[in-house]
Amino acid sequence: MFANREEAGILLSQKLINYRNNEDAVIVSVPRGGVPIGYVLHQKLNLPMELLLSKKIGHPFLKDYIIGVVSRDFKVLDPLTSAAVSGAYINNEVERLRKQLKLRYNGYYKLYNSINFKNKTVILVDEGAVTGNTLLYSIQLIQQKHPKEIIIAIPVSPISTLRKIEHLKLVKSTICLHSPNEFRTVGQFYTDFKSISDNEVFSILNKVGYNTEPRIANNN
């Protein structure tokens, strides 16, 4: 059990101490829950920190049924679930979601220069994983930016999920602090698992030095 995300970040930083001050490494956090953990790693390891913003593409008739994911630059489709979906629908969704992502980027960053992942060691951070689908999509998005390697750093996840991730080609290693046999939700392993708001993300990015400005303040 972790007291909160900050404690989980401290414990993860101890496992990643060999990357401290590494000029070729970057922390990449999955918003919003991964951001406080990524910030602790940024502090403890003296590494730059980036966010991986993306939107899930839902099925045209079952919006909760995910057929892919899109970032500002790339998209990843599930070859099975997207096979019967029209290309026109996918293109329209990609355009619509990218407009939302642009607004979110403009909200998170007043002045922003994205970190180039090419030939970098990317340490991908989240608050935990249940099915691992978010991490799997995130890895595929990062791969398109040609990193040297990817390290997964999460506080908690089922062993079955870790096995799905650790065998991927660019994943050098998977660091997970706790892999319980019984697993329902990530939140059950935190004493304090409050939701993270956009304003809290703004505050963290200001501390990192991204000169953020709270232009958006919703929690969607």
Image (cartoon, helix red, strand yellow):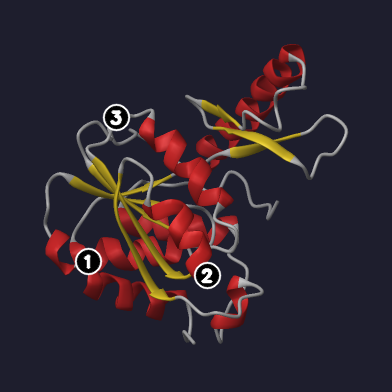
Residue denoted by label 2: 158
CA gap between label 3 and label 1 equals 22 Å
Residue denoted by label 1: 16
Closest to the observer, 87 or 198: 87
Q: Quadrant of residue 215?
A: top right
Q: Secondary structure at mark 2?
A: loop
Residue at the image point whose x is 56% and y is 30% from the top: 102
Residue denoted by label 3: 146
Residue at the image point whose x is 77% and y is 22% from the top: 84
Q: Residue furthest right?
A: 61
CA gap between label 2 and label 3 equals 28 Å
| Rendered view: 21 above or below 74 | below
Q: Viewer-nearest of labels 2 and 3?
A: 2
Residue at the image point whose x is 52% and y is 41% from the top: 137
How many numbered discs sit on the rendered protein?
Answer: 3
Query: Which is nearer the N-term, disc 2 or disc 3?
Result: 3
- Amino acid at circle 1: Leu
| Rendered view: 42 above or below 189 | above
Q: Can see residue 154?
A: yes
Does residue 24 appear left or right of residue 182 in this picture?
Answer: left
Q: Position of residue 167 (x, y in %)?
A: 37, 49
Q: Quadrant of residue 55?
A: top right
Does residue 69 appear left or right of residue 174 in this picture?
Answer: right
- Amino acid at circle 2: Pro
Q: Secondary structure at mark 1?
A: loop
The 10 Å Cα crowd at callout 3, few under 14, some 14 to 19, many 20 or more, is: some
Q: Quadrant of residue 75?
A: top right
The 10 Å Cα crowd at callout 2, few under 14, some 14 to 19, many 20 or more, is: many
Query: Which is nearer the N-term, disc 2 or disc 1?
Result: 1
Q: Position of residue 183 (x, y in %)?
A: 61, 76
Residue at the image point whose x is 43% and y is 66% from the top: 36
